[in-house]
Image (cartoon, rainbow, N blue to C red):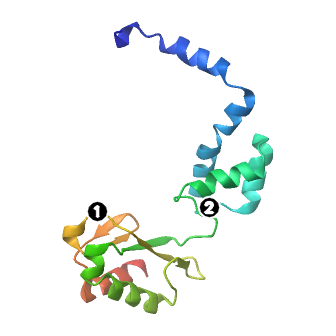
Amino acid sequence: MNMMDINFDAQYKMLGNALTADQKRRGLIIHSLQEIQKEHNYLPEDVLKELSRSLKVPISVIYSTASFYKHFYFEPRGKNIVSVCTGTACHVRGATKVLNTLEEEFGIKRGETTKDLSLTIETVGCVGCCGLAPVVVVNNEVVGDVEIKKTEEIIEMVK
């Protein structure tokens, strides 16, 4: 069958009629969670309860959906996110020293956020830039070959 032979409007209409109202509401959950997190930088409990009421979906469904995906957060996160790669190549080339330096400088441990919400430090299993090890990702910007001088530059960048 040729793509030109498919009537997409009819297919979407048929699909739309096949879904129940409940299925359509549940289909909005992930997009809604993304929008909430974009606005608040995490998923506040009161907003999730409101989403549950608005969509007429049990709060347990909202939480189970959000907790299934690693990119949703239930605690406030910092304005700056610093992710230290702890994969094998990065570990062997000094990632632990970089992580320890960042933790000492900002007074928080991996997985924590500063009280003023300016920074969250986290670790990731692999960034996929093993040739640049050790690697730190600062606000989605990859920084490779991180040693003491670059660690100091990262600290200044996020301050």
Q: Quadrant of the N terminus?
A: top left
Q: Residues within 10 Å of mark 1 (few under 14, many from 20)?
A: few
Answer above or below: position of 68 versus 142: above
Q: Which percent across, then down, holds residue 80?
A: 47, 72
* Mark 1 element type: loop
Q: Residues within 10 Å of mark 2 (few under 14, many from 20)?
A: few
Q: Which percent across, then down, holds residue 63?
A: 69, 55
Answer above or below: position of 79 versus 99: above
Name of the residue lying farthest toward the left: 131
Q: What residue is shown with label 1?
A: 128
Name of the residue lying farthest toward the front: 88
The three-letter amino acid code for the residue at tag 2 is His
Q: What residue is shown with label 2?
A: 40
Answer above or below: position of 132 versus 2: below
**Left or right of 130 on screen, residue 117:** right
Residue 130 in which image quadrant: bottom left
- Distance CA(mark 1)–CA(mark 2): 29 Å
Residue nearer the viewer, 66 or 152: 66
Mark closer to the chain start, 1 or 2: 2
Labels 1, 2: front one:
1
**Left or right of 159 on screen, residue 76:** right
The three-letter amino acid code for the residue at tag 1 is Gly
* Mark 2 element type: helix
Task: Give the residue drawn at x 42%, y 78%.
Answer: 158
Task: Give the residue drawn at x 76%, y 60%.
Answer: 46
Q: Which percent across, then down, holds residue 87?
A: 33, 72
